Image: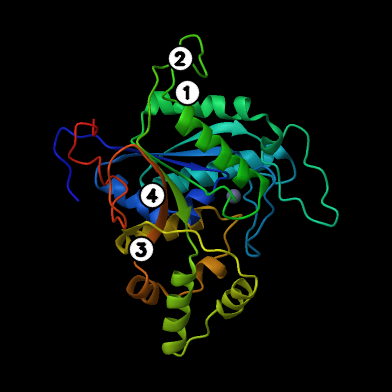
Amino acid sequence: MSSAPHEQLRLMAVHAHPDDESSKGAATTARYAAEGVDVLVVTCTGGERGDVLNPTFVVPEAHEFDTLEGKRALRRAEMEVAAEALGVRQTWLGFVDSGLPEGDPLPPLPEGCFALVPLEEAAAPLVELVRRFRPHVMTTYDPSGGYPHPDHIKCHEVAFEAFHAAGDASRYQVDGGAAPWQPLKLYYNHGFSMERMRAVHEAMQGAGLESPFGDWIESRTAREIPERTVTTKIECAKYFPQRDAALLAHASQIDPNGFFFAVPRDVEAEVWPWEEFELAESHVPTRTPEDDLFAGIRGTEAAR
Ligand SMILES: [Zn+2]
């Protein structure tokens, strides 16, 4: 996928927390960045309410993990390393993590958190960022959040709103704000399609390895969760090492012996060298299935 010399393609990946960019579509962003696309990861919240999810993690001397401020600082430091591993730029929207409410009944969300910010207020900084960065393509989560965390659902809502409003001069006007910009395509990340999980599961069993996905596949089949459509597969196995380095950079969140590292990397690269996306909106003609997020844009007048 080569670009004409005068082209400057831009990709904006909108995520809820620091670490989401490394677990959803990470190798795709690394690939595009390596190929000369300007890639900007936008992180809606500071991840201030994430628990330590790595049993081997030790809070570094210079940091603390007991306050929202302390956690924010630590996770910013982790994010910086992850972005460098992926070779992408990254910026923050500045909202505060809502946390994942647990219990029955669920406790109320904490005051002032991202999920409770009214949509117009939550989307405003992203609209301005879209107008300044002028992405051709945006990625985010599907309306379910892909995972029922209130910040993931809010992340979808905010990115969806910005995709639709940034090109409209009558909306989200601010003094000194940038000119309207209409991104051309909107995609949803899909990391765990049944097709992928089955392929990996079968390959591991075939290799005599214990697959961690058997129960997962069974419970999902039993619950009859409808599968969303995958329209676009990006081949990116060459960039899995960068994705892994980015994951590990989030040392407080990612267990090096856990779920994300359960599949031997040679098996993964052979059986499933792709990351998957769902084309949700397009302002350019394109034919699915696609193998490029910039299909219909690359090589056209729009690729500037
Ligand atoms: Zn998240």
Label 1 vs 3, first from the N-terminus: 1
Mark 2 in CB contact with mark 1 (< 8 angstroms) = yes
From the image, tell me which residue sits under label 2.
177
Q: Amino acid at mark 4?
A: Leu
Q: CA distance from mark 1 to mark 4?
A: 24 Å
* Residue 304 position by quadrant: top left
Label 2 vs 4, first from the N-terminus: 4
Q: Nearer the viewer, residue 204 or 286?
A: 286
Q: Amino acid at mark 2?
A: Gly
Label 3 vs 4, first from the N-terminus: 4
Which x, y percent locates residue 106? 82, 51
Tag on residue 274?
3
Q: Amino acid at mark 3?
A: Trp
Say above or below: 79 vs 215: above
Q: CA distance from mark 2 to mark 4?
A: 30 Å
Mark 2 in CB contact with mark 4 (< 8 angstroms) = no
Classify mark 2: residues with Cα within 10 Å, few (<14), some (14-19) or many (20+): few
Label 1 vs 4, first from the N-terminus: 4
Element on which disc 2 rests? loop
Q: CA distance from mark 3 to mark 2?
A: 38 Å
Q: Residue at x 25, y 40 (%)?
A: 297
